[in-house]
Each structure stands twice: as structure tokens, then as C-alpha cells.
Amino acid sequence: MKRVYIDRHFCIGCGLCELACLTVHSRSKDLAIAYTVERPQGLMSFKKVFRDGSMCASTGCRHCDEPACVEACIAGALTKDPATGRTVYDPEQCVGCMSCLMACPFGAISKSPLEDKIVKCDRCVELDMPACVQACPNRALMYEER
Amino acid sequence: MLFKPTDSYAHDFEVHRDRDACIDCKVCVNQCSYGVHYWDENRKKVMHDSSQCVGCHRCEAMCPTDALRIRRRETEFKDNPLWNSKFIKYIYKQASTGGVLLTGMGCPTDIPVYWDRMLLDASQVTNPSIDPLREPMELDTFLGAKPNSLAFHKDENGKPVLDTKLTPQIKLKTPIMFAAMSFGAINFNLHVAMARAAKECGTCYNTGEGGLHPSLYEYGDHTIVQVASGRFGVHRDYLNAGVGIEIKVGQGAKPGIGGHLPGEKIDARVSETRMVPLGSDAISPAPHHDIYSIEDLHQLIFALKEASEYRVPVAVKIAAVHNVAAIASGIVRAGADIVTIDGMRGGTGAAPAMIRDNVGIPIELALAAVDQRLRDENIRHKASLIVGGGVRCSADVVKAIALGADAVNIGTAALLAVGCTLCGRCYTGKCPWGIATNDALLAKRQNPDVAAKKLANLVRAWSHEIMEMLGGMGLNSIESLRGNRDKLRAVGLSAEEMDTLGVKLAGR
């Protein structure tokens, strides 16, 4: 199963992955509108770049084989799709208990700023290659089988 | 000009930010290592200070909305061919610093580019051209001394057996090598990339004077190790790590002067490799303190041959200067197997502007003069010629080989392949493209996987083009072009220039 991997030795902290994520998950699919209009309205990037001195890394959901978030979910909103390997989030089912947020050992789940729901990577269902990987200028993000 | 010196207006570049396109995402802020772009907390938007801009175009390349343009600053001094803006700014700068003007990369002054004044031949009607996609085309190049003659005897089955003992050769699959750029001047990631690309293309890279990191010994078959005046990182294993040893006497960008790698660039890995203390300046003296004559050079060449048990050829690299032909002759007579000549447009990590722009001669003239002198003295076969310093494309390589070179070094072209924009601020150690820097955050910008691919692509593309040009001339081997100046014709050159180049006027 292909996953998004980060090589932190070559993440340059530019943040283009965050912008790409924001764009493909926006209504407008337009970076300028997504960033300046939709983001203040609650649109969030599923990727987060951490920077500390010379260290930086772009992080996000790892779509774990045995996801702690799925186990913790009380409403059946988080499920593991055996066909694609994705950890799928269904906001309709979500009751906003935030158990998954606390259970995720990687801090890959965020609370939506607008409603009692979570925000989590969907691994770009509609794209062959996730947007963050496509946008990475230094091949620090890789989408591959390991 | 609040809080600024009055001469700070005279800077070279100006940032143009399209405010309609800019979304204040701060990518430019985190990419600029010179502090040009910054987040203004009061205005809540990204602002810039053009006076710090070096014109590297990193922000322009990374801006996701194409909102940035870096342009030459429009402020223009009154037209004056003598006192042009370059010299006015030099004087302003030196009047405030009192220091030597430092620069990086090769000489940008308007000296004639002889490559552009020489044209190549092609076959028509009487001698067929060759299609390199359908017929074999040989770019294999052997560097090292060749014997005066070959002697054979026949074995009991009547097969010829070579009696002549051949001297060591470096075998290349293409006559293009990566020029000496030291680990320290450029960072570890690029050394890894050059080593991998050299291996992939069947050619060599040169360590430069900064030693060889132990993890790169595995690429030894594609490595030429350099011994320079500072002797950084030179030890027995190092000398035996590669397929050739190069004694660096001079560098085209700064003939006659040494090198100075500032302490800030000496991190743990550079310190370990160069065998110098962490954070201390690594200073290469201007001369080798043990070479003051051809006889001294002879001693060093043979000391290195002894140390490497006569297993690898020894090269001597000099800058192209006025009496280059006589010097090269002396070098060959001193026992060098390869002479490397670096022309005045060759790059550098740091050189005084006055030296870079005014000392030395163009490589085309130096190469022609050296090749002719060695031929006249019947010693051309005793050494191979490698040239560098301003080789921009595969046609330049072909012209260099027709003028007499065995192979060329590409340094600036290799750096351009990995993103360099020739901003010329290598000496600051803040290269925003992650090339001439050992800053941990900046050096990450060169992912060896990406960089190796680009370098290998460049060499492969040039090699294909060289084959096309050879085929067009009706040649099927690079050997047939070597020193074949009949394949060159000159345009717009004086009789003396054509005489020095050994090239006829077009139409003759």
C-alpha cells in the first residue's frame, strides 16, 4: 500500500505542501481564494510543517495499519478501508467527542475551528498522487510503497 | 533614509510584488536567507527590503502565486562609459567598508568569448555524415600519458601480445567531468550528488581541495582527488581513494592567490574531512610552499606517484595565464600525466573582484597555445589536457576538443543544473539555493536524489549532442576530433587571434 513518507533531512520548511493541501480541499480550488477567503472561514490544511532551528518536517496522517483513532472512535465515523488502505473520516457520523484527536499518537488530527468536527487527511481520494507530494519542490515528501 | 547610510540606495536589485497576486503566505519569507522578505506584524502582511536582495531569484522560483519579480534596480546613474555603475558602486562600497571587494562565481566582464567566434564543420556530399542513433559512436576517453610507440610479440598461437608497459589511465565514457569544487565551498549533499552522477554517467568528479568524506570512498572509481596548497584532508587513504590525483597549483577565477574558507563554513563534517579544527578558518596559501620550481613540482608529482604506488595518473592544474604554454611544457616534463588548465571565466566560491575580473586569459587561447606548444615539442602524447572555465554547452565541448583538449571540466554549468542563478554571493555562505552553504537548514535544499538526477541528465544530454555533432562531421569517435582544428573555422577574428587559435577564417 502506498503511503506519504517524509524525509526530514530534505524537508526545507517552505510550506508549499500546506498550501497545496489547502487548495485541493477548498471549494474554489484556487490557492488565492482558498488562502485569503476560505481559510479565515475555517478551511484547514491537513498537513502541518513543524520548524525548529535547522529541523523541519511536514507531518500528516499516516493512515496507520492499526489506527488508534479508529479504535477510539465512538461513533463509527473513522474507519479503515481495506481496499485502499486509507483511514476514512465520515463527518456525518462524527459526534465531535475528540477521542480520536487524543488517541492519535502523531498529532495528525486537528479540531475544526468552526464546528465540533475534526480535520484529517483524506490522502487526496480524487488524485493519483496526493497534492502535498506533487507540490514538494525537494522530493522530501514521497508517495510510495515501502 | 532613516537609520541607513546614504549610499544604501545604490543596490542592484528590486523586488516587485504584485499585491493582487500575493496572498501573504510567507513562503518567500522562509526561503530568503538574506532577510529581504519579512512578516510585518503591524501591517499584517509580507513586506520586503530590496536593499538586501542579491538577485538569486529563489523567492521568485518558490512563490506559489507568481507574485514576485526580481528586476534590476531602475535607479540609473548618468551615462558614462568610463565610470559605469559597477565602478561607482564598488567605490561606494569600499569607501564604507575599507575592504577588498569579494565576489563569487566566474568573471562576468565583457571579454571576447572565442567559442562564439568559432564554427564547426559538417559533411556534405563527398564524405557521408553518420547517424549516431543507427551507427556506433565512441565518446570513450582515456586520460593519462600515452607511450611513444607500441611494441608487440606473437605468442605460440600467433596472437599479438603487447610488450609496452602502459601507464595508468582514467577511462571516461564521455569527455565531460565535474570540476573541482571542494567539500566546504559546496556542501556534502552536492558532493554526494556529483559522485552519484559521475558514477551513473561513467565519468569523474573532482573532490576539490577539501578532502573526501569517508562515506564517499565507495565512489572512488569515479573520483579524482585533489592536493592543493592547504593540503586539507590529504592522507594515504585519500590519495589512494580515487582514480587520479590532481595537484592544484592555480584556479582560473583567482590565479596567483590562495583560498580562504571562513570558519563559519567549517562544521563538524567539514572539520573531520579537512582535518582542521571546528570553526577555524581553512586557509590555502597562494603558493605550494614546497613548489618553487619545475624540479620541486617533479618531486611532488613523484612523491604522490610513490604514495599511490604508480597506480593512478597525476594531474597538475594551473590557471590560464600569460605564459601558460611554457608552464604546461614544464609541467609535462616534470612528469605530470594530465595537465588541467582553468580559464579566467572559471568559477570560485570566493575571490577578490579585481583578481577574478582582471587576472588570467581566456581558456580558448590558452588551450590552443598549450596544445600547439606540446605538439611542437613532441610531448603532446606524454600528457592529457583537461580544460575548464567557461564551458557553457556541448558545442563548447566539441570546440574545446577540436582545439586539442582531451576532456573538459564543468563547474558553473553543473551548479546551474542544480539551481544556481549566478548571483555571485557564494562567499557569504548563505546560498538560498543550498549550494555554496553548509548551513544545516539551507543545505537541505539540495536533495542528492534530485541533484544527482539533474547532473546526470545534463551530462547525458550534452553527450547526445556531442554524438550528433560528431556524426554531422562524419566522425564516429571523439578521438578523431581531438586536436582536429580543421573542423573549426573562425568568424570576426583578427589574423593574430586566428593564428593563436590555429584556426582558418570561415570560407578558407
Image (cartoon, rainbow, N blue to C red):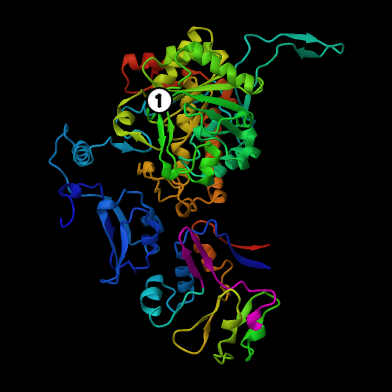
Outermost residue, top side: B377
Q: Chain of mark 1?
A: B
Residue drawn at x 45%, y 60% is A53
Image side of residue A41 versus residue B443, left or right: left
* Quarter of the image where one finds residue B81: top left
Q: Nearer the viewer, residue B158 or B124?
A: B158
- Based on the picture, tell me whether residue B100 belongs to the magenta stretch: no
Image side of residue B367 versus residue B195, left or right: left
Q: Residues within 10 Å of mark 1 (few under 14, many from 20)?
A: some
Q: Is residue A43 above or below residue B389?
A: below
Q: Is residue A65 visible?
A: yes
Residue A35: percent from left, percent from top = 39, 74
The kind of residue tagged 1 is Ala
Outermost residue, right side: B156
Residue drawn at x 54%, y 44% is B269
Q: Dividing the image into 4 quarters, which one contains the C terminus of chain A?
A: bottom right
Image side of residue A75 versus residue A43, left or right: right
Q: Secondary structure at mark 1?
A: loop
Image side of residue B360 versus residue B277, left or right: left
Residue B16: percent from left, percent from top = 27, 58
Q: Is residue B353 above or below residue B288?
A: below
Q: Is residue B336 visible?
A: no
Residue B198: percent from left, percent from top = 59, 38
Tell me the residue that label 1 is attached to. Answer: B286
All told, the count of numbered labels is: 1
* Quarter of the image where one finds residue B39: bottom left
* Magenta range: A47-70
Q: Dividing the image into 4 quarters, which one contains the N terminus of chain A?
A: bottom right
Q: Is residue B341 above or below residue B198?
A: above
Q: Nearer the viewer, residue B450 or B271?
A: B271
